[in-house]
Amino acid sequence: MSNLIIKNGMLFDPINNISGEKKDLLIEAGKIVDKFKHTNPKDVKSIDASGKTVIPGAIDIHTHIASQQTNNIRLLGSKNKEFQQFWNGLTLDYLTKEYVSKGYTFIVEANIFPSLAKQTIFNFGQIPILDKAMLINASNLWPLELEYQRGDIEKMSVFISDLLDLVKGFGLKIYNPFEAEEWDFKEIRDDITTNGRLYNFNALDVFRNMTKTIEQIGLPHSIHAHIDGYESEIGELNAINVLEDIKTQELTPNQLGQTKIKRSQIFHLAHASAYSFNDDTKLINFFNSNDNFDLDLGFISFNPINPLITSDRRLINKYLDKKKTPKTHPVIKGAFESEGDHFETFRTLKKDNSEYCRLWSNALNLALRIKDKWKIQFSINFPNYAHLTNIPEIISWLLNKNSRNTFMENMNNEFKQDNPIFNIEDTFSINDLIIITRASPAKSLGLGDIKGNLGIGADSDINILDINLQEKDLDSQIDEIKKAFSNIDTVIKNGIIVKQGEKINLNHKGALYWSKGTVNTQNYEKIMDKKKEFYKKYSSIFYESLKPNTDKIKLIKI
């Protein structure tokens, strides 16, 4: 690790209430320090950041780049010229360079089935520079069937903590719970209050009990939820029902550990743009009125072709409906034993489609109209909704009304007639932008002490932009700002300069962050013995066989 001093930079650091102040930053042994303690001044490298902006490294709280499902997309697209040209085959080397060029230093793979954690960690090992974490999909785990039915939080807590320890997961994704009970992919339940045929509970019970479980064991990140029927009217109804139900449980955030900057939420809604169709004020009003909830936005852009990676039956069946989608691409369908469904294909998000235009405006409406920016995080549901190369343009929509109006000019006429986005004058400040792309994701993940900020003791994950954002006019100079975010001039990771100008150093390895929480019970071994026995009796794999090989990746336990 290098020892650095960054001089005369214009700092934006919302966690530490710094918004456009000229300051020096000292870096020793990969951490930001107030003074050098063990370093010879001759060994310190100086970086002159005069006229430049210094901000924390960006964090992607919701991405899909290292799962088996993404590998299926790579396979499907191997002979698709559009996919190869626009997405470069989604190769890990290409994605690493794009992430780093956009200033990212931490990513969260947001949907991993337990039996596929091995593949994800193998893929993580091929991704240098970036720190990573993965959310384990526990939505359809048959070993928890009785606990979901009985609301047995003690047994759920033991199993979830042990599972996260075994596969090195960071947190939990809950995604269309127990929809996979029906083996026919075309079978769709009426709504989330519908009980299963083989079990006496419903999807709402799973969301409720898993939220309680996560708070019981004190994980750094809250439940991370994908709710049935996204990109549809029933998805909006289901989302509001889930949020209102969790609210009635009167839970409070219970992140355990010594961290000073703890998360504020008990529930995280993923790609929230997908849950506003008939009345986009419902979600906005809910989040403006309730403090223990947050969301990532799910911005979309309109590209020649987009991968579609999902476990949502309603969405894939809608896509395969020839009346609604006359031309479709090949689809990979599958189910992982006792864990859930998966579907992979391609689609094109077009500006002449009113539903896709509404998705586009939903993310902006949420971002601009939710008052507390600490409740929202920037995301593009990569690669489902947008490419990393679209990020600078998306940033311009937040900072500048003319940019979004210009982008809307050739959108669907029906959409343009009644969408409230046309009447919103609000725009982001630079500080708001740094909050939702860096500070808020770090806080939501329970990593606010070490990520997303430039305070003493934080990891030295830093961007230096070749522009002084404090002096730029967000209206007349928006193109200069877009250019600066298109290719971050200098990226520092753990005190190592990994990008300077056009050169990227791919030799630096990132770490895998994981957590198991804390369980206090004398029944731990007894509970786990029964769960392992369940796998022996009813699964084709032993529970212990889920353990991945982590010899080649650095592990950091939170």
Image (cartoon, rainbow, N blue to C red):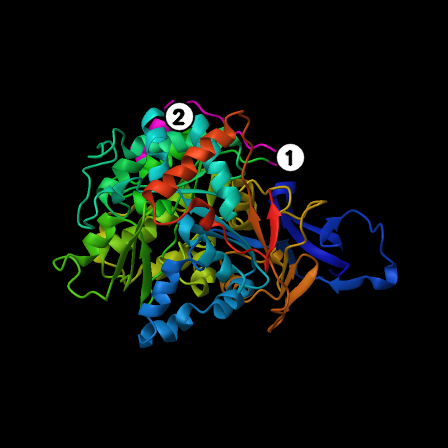
Rendered location of residue 448, percent (x, y): 60, 42
Q: Of circles 2 and 1, which is in front?
A: 2
Seen from the viewer's position, the closer of residues 221 and 381 is 221
Mark 2 residue type = Asp
Residue 243 lies in the magenta-colored region: yes
Residue marked by disc 1: 260
Residue marked by disc 2: 152
**Disc 1 element:** loop
Rendered location of residue 420, percent (x, y): 30, 45
Quadrant where the N terminus is found in the figure: bottom right
Seen from the viewer's position, the closer of residues 450 and 211 is 211
In the picture, residue 535 is in which quadrant?
Answer: top left
Q: Residue at x 32, y 45 (%)?
A: 338
- Answer whether labels 2 and 1 touch (C-beta < 8 Å): no
Which circle's residue, 2 or 1, is located before the other in the chain? 2
Judge the density around disc 2: few (<14), some (14-19), many (≥20) Cα neighbours within 10 Å. Answer: some
Seen from the viewer's position, the closer of residues 301 and 67 is 67
Mark 1 residue type = Lys
363 on left or right of 100: left
Rendered location of residue 288, percent (x, y): 42, 33
Quadrant where the C terminus is found in the figure: top right
Residue 484 lies in the magenta-colored region: no
Judge the density around disc 1: few (<14), some (14-19), many (≥20) Cα neighbours within 10 Å. Answer: few
**Disc 2 element:** loop
Seen from the viewer's position, the closer of residues 292 and 75 is 75
Rendered location of residue 13, percent (x, y): 63, 47
Q: Does 438 appear above or below 329?
A: above
Residue projecting furthest to the left: 323
How far apart marks 2 and 1 lie (CA) works out to 31 Å
Magenta range is 240-261
555 on left or right of 366: right
